[in-house]
Amino acid sequence: MKIYNEIIAIIADILEVNPEVLNEKSSVGLVENWDSIHQLMIISSIEEKYGISFPEDSLFEMTSIEAMVRATETEIKG
């Protein structure tokens, strides 16, 4: 739950939206301002925060908060 909340905070900050409008099903195109440029900013911020690097092939699958949390947890566990 901690990672989920931290990712919500990152996304809300980058997209300049209230975190309360976001949930695990929020995704690219469904949230105002969440486009491909912001997607890259979000992924970069998550990688920086957790000191991880997502495999290139997973980047295209990380289009929702739920997918980002899952991928982040996977990378942290190694």
Image (cartoon, grey):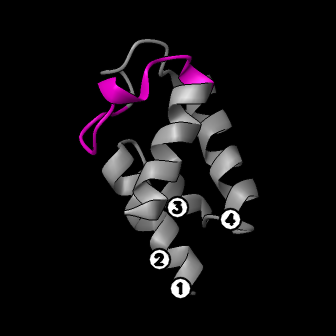
Residue 6 seen in the figure: yes
Residue 6 in percent (x, y) is at 52, 51
Q: Nearer the viewer, residue 26 or 37?
A: 26
Q: Which residue is mark 2?
A: 74
Specify the segment rendered in magenta: 14-27
In terms of sequence position, does the residue under pointer 4 or pointer 3 come before the other?
4
Q: Residues within 10 Å of mark 1 (few under 14, many from 20)?
A: few
Determine the CA span between mark 1 and mark 4.
11 Å
Q: Residue furthest bottom?
A: 78
Q: Residues within 10 Å of mark 2 (few under 14, many from 20)?
A: few
Three-letter amino acid code at the position of disc 2: Thr
Q: Residues within 10 Å of mark 4 (few under 14, many from 20)?
A: few
Q: Residues within 10 Å of mark 3 (few under 14, many from 20)?
A: few
Determine the CA span between mark 4 and mark 2.
12 Å
Determine the CA span between mark 1 and mark 3.
18 Å
In terms of sequence position, does the residue under pointer 1 or pointer 4 come before the other?
4
